[in-house]
Amino acid sequence: MEPQINDLQIESRVRELFDFTVCTNHMSSTIYQCPNDHTEELDSENPEKKPYNCPYSGSKCTLTGDIQWLLPHLRNDHHVEMHDGRSFSHRYVHHNPKHLHHATWMLTLLDCFGRQFCLYFEAFHLLKTPMYIAFIQFMGDEEEATNFSYTLEVSGNGRKLTWQGVPRSIRDSHKTVRDSQDGLIITRKSALFFSTDNNNKELKLKLSGRLWREHTH
Ligand SMILES: [Zn+2]
């Protein structure tokens, strides 16, 4: 049975629970004409124009485009919400966390400094240990991504765990970042200590964070 997972604040739901998903986009070809479908031949001449893969994590989406094309695509076709501001707070809820599968919560877009970032929250197994991971990716290239830093913090019941990181470019897939463990990792056992649901039937994690731009010289 599929675990039911909600993100209360952004009313998201799990689109896809497992990594080996088939493509489930319901997109019609008329809506989904990508303006960058013909840029492949330009890649070698101008690598900066190489389109980005769609960073949506809930289902496998094979569409590509530049950032300005991807933003309305994420909003309109994947129903991803955009949040303005440098700091954010979300509550992730996992019903029946004892049965932790590979799961992906709804992606959140963060808009600050005139750029956009993707906030991911996923459940996975490291060897046989069930884990959660949260991390941020930058909607742009790796070189520019290093201009930014972020913190993620899970807290509750007098406990706090903080991660400070550098957002990875969406040139890397969210799966690549997850598998390299470049983010805030919470084991299922420790997650229960942060959960604000005392009977532990549901896992409720409060995740807050902040993004900033490093001073560039
Ligand atoms: Zn997509």
Image (cartoon, grey):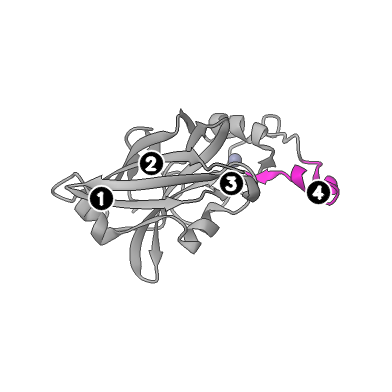
Q: Which residue is found at the position 34% from the left and 36% from the top?
A: 89
Q: Earlier in the sequence, mark 1 or mark 4?
A: 4
| Quarter of the figure that contains the N terminus | bottom left
Nearer the observer, 68 or 123: 68
- Find numbered disc 4 in the image and state the secondary structure of the residue it sits on: helix
The reply to whether the magenta stretch includes residue 49 is yes
Q: Earlier in the sequence, mark 3 or mark 1?
A: 3
Q: CA distance from mark 3 to mark 1?
A: 27 Å
Q: Residues within 10 Å of mark 1 (few under 14, many from 20)?
A: few
- Find numbered disc 1 in the image and state the secondary structure of the residue it sits on: strand
| Quarter of the figure that contains the C terminus | top right
Q: Which residues are magenta?
A: 37-53
- The reply to whether dot 3 and dot 4 touch (C-beta < 8 Å) is no
* Residue 123: percent from left, percent from top: 38, 55
On screen, residue 165 versus residue 72, left or right, reads left
Q: CA distance from mark 3 to mark 4?
A: 21 Å
* Residue tagged 4: 43
Question: Mark 3 near ligand 1 (CB under 8 Å)?
Answer: no
Q: Could you tell me the amino acid type at mark 1?
A: Lys
- The reply to whether dot 3 and dot 1 touch (C-beta < 8 Å) is no
* Residue tagged 1: 160
Q: Could you tell me the amino acid type at mark 3?
A: Ala
Q: Could you tell me the amino acid type at mark 4?
A: Asp
Q: Which residue is found at the position 13% from the left and 49% from the top?
A: 199
* Residue tagged 3: 145
Q: Quadrant of ligand 1?
A: top right
* Residue tagged 2: 209
Nearer the observer, 94 or 174: 174
Q: CA distance from mark 2 to mark 3?
A: 17 Å
Q: CA distance from mark 2 to mark 1?
A: 12 Å
